[in-house]
Amino acid sequence: MNLNKNIRWRTVPNTNGFYQVSELGQLRMIKKELSTYNIHNITGNIFSIIPFTVKDKNYGDMKLKIPHYQIDTISGKITIAASTLVFSAFHGIMNLDHHEIFHLDGNELNNSVDNLILCEKDSKKRMVKMYYDEKSEMIQLPNNTMKNFQVISVYNLEGYKQDIYINRKICSRILNIPIHIIVSVMEGNKMLAYEGKIFKQGDGPYVIDTSLILDNKIILTNSSSMLNRRLVLQYDANGNLKKVYNNYHEASVQNNFSIQAIKDAIQKKSILNRCIWILEEKETIDSYYKNMELVSV
């Protein structure tokens, strides 16, 4: 498995940041040794990779092999499709069924962000029926059919589909919105919505769950590879890990503190709002806390 440090990772919703999914569909979780800050001899990455299991899902008389992960959420343990995790973390869209996500290369095991688009359930079932190849166990689409996936679906913030455009250029001209803005929203790089509109590639379902966007539970940034290695860990006063944030901005928004206040708490090794804050970078957790003296603020 490729663990290139340039890969983008995003927090899986409703897991307190203990789980993160990559733009390639990999899943990792915070190591159990980090459940408290009073630990020793911890080196290297603070996350461990979680393997997926493959489940056969029926599409009429055919079956597709769908990778699933088992994770612990705030509501309990669940089993969820890898593609669903990617859409929730990178697009702010919850509860999509694997029938509502189409893989452009026909390979359900390839859950990279740029391989996934929205689709209607009936459309996917029809595609499987027409183009499923039993030998490769994948959907083998002819080249002329691929043009259909340039379609852009436009949703409002409540998740209802408003319009469909045959491509991003037409969408840009009719809505008078620059193409780079549409692409940014569509790919979830810098924002999830623009002027009350959500743009997603593909002819998606009539309704999508946008609760993460409405509740501002996902903060997306176009962060560099260095920033991806700067995770903000939040512990309670007893040293129990509460939450892991992708960056300062996410920690700031979800705790209603300024970024500077969090930076000061980390730099001064002080307690902020009865919490201990750690910036996990190149150094190990153990070396960060060595000889640490906590000063209440």
Image: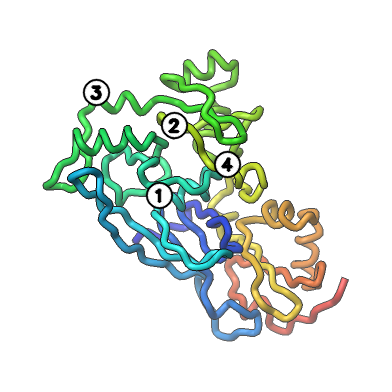
Q: Residue at x 25, y 44 (%)?
A: 59
Counting residues from the start of the chain, the first of labels 3 and 1 encountered is 1
What amino acid is found at the position of numbered circle 3 in the picture?
Answer: Asn
- Secondary structure under tag 2 reads strand
- Secondary structure under tag 3 reads helix
| Location of residue 50 in the rendering, given as x and y in whole percent from the top left corner | 41, 67
Of 260 and 275, the residue lying toward us: 275
Residue 83 is marked as 1
* Label 3 sits on residue: 144
| Location of residue 110 in the rendering, given as x and y in whole percent from the top left corner | 32, 49
Counting residues from the start of the chain, the first of labels 2 and 1 encountered is 1
Q: Residue furthest front?
A: 60
Q: Residue furthest top?
A: 174
Residue 210 is marked as 4
Mark toward the viewer: 2 or 4: 4
What amino acid is found at the position of numbered circle 2 in the picture?
Answer: Gln
275 in relation to 157, above or below: below
What amino acid is found at the position of numbered circle 4 in the picture?
Answer: Thr
| Location of residue 162 in the rendering, given as x and y in whole percent from the top left corner | 53, 24
Counting residues from the start of the chain, the first of labels 2 and 4 encountered is 2
* Label 2 sits on residue: 201
Q: Residue furthest right?
A: 297
C-alpha span from label 2 to label 1: 15 Å
123 in relation to 93, above or below: above
